Amino acid sequence: MQGSATVVIDAPAIDVWNVVSDIRNTGKFSPETFEAEWLDGATGPALGAKFRGHVKRNEIGPVYWTTCRVTACTPGEEFGFAVLAGNRAVNNWHYRFESRGPSTAVTESFHMPGPKLLDVAMFLRKRRNIRDMTKTLERVKDYVENGSADPDR
């Protein structure tokens, strides 16, 4: 299962990348992950760095921590990470930053490996992820362009 959302932000790609790739900002933008922190001595984005996110699934629960590993880290171009169950990736999140003059098109995407069957639960999860990615990117846009993120959007 996979999906994506794109929002154009009126700022240079590197400025938007710096906000998104600092996972400590996640709680300002994500509807489900309300905090995140670097692990194992990491202090910022780097290929292979690990962090954990505190998640409130569907904004109602359950609440749990996930461990993630950075899988893509090119300043101003891309940032990605895998959500891990042990050492196995159960979901992959990726951001691509495309300069468009003074603006940046930011695409957030996810890919969950596994069966190709599309049952009702998978359809609902995909729909939820796309809605939440759009909400996240709109909050990033507000933050970068106006200096604030509206968590009630």
Image (tube, helix red, strand yellow):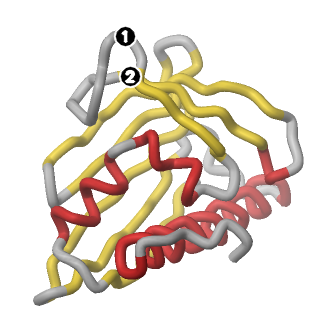
Residue at screen point 36% across, 80% down = 145
Q: Position of residue 110 (x, y in %)?
A: 49, 53
| Amino acid type, label 2 | Lys
Q: Which residue is mark 1?
A: 40
Query: Where residue 103 sits in the image (x, y, percent)?
Result: 22, 85
Q: Which residue is mark 2?
A: 50
Decide which of 89, 63 is in the foreground and name it: 63
Res. 87 mark: none
Task: Please tell me which residue is depicted at 56% across the width and 73% down the height of the picture.
Answer: 134
Q: Quadrant of residue 11?
A: bottom left
The image quadrant that residue 70 belongs to is top left
- Name which residue type carries label 1: Asp
Task: Count neighbours of disc 2 (C-alpha within 10 A) and say few if under 14, some if 14 to 19, many if 20 or more.
Answer: many
Quadrant of residue 51 in the image?
Answer: top left
Q: CA distance from mark 1 to mark 2?
A: 7 Å
Q: Is 132 left or right of 69, judged from the image as shown?
A: right
Q: Tell which of 87 and 54 is nearer to you.
A: 54
Q: Residues within 10 Å of mark 1 (few under 14, many from 20)?
A: few
- Residues tagged 1 and 2 counted as in contact (Cβ below 8 A): yes
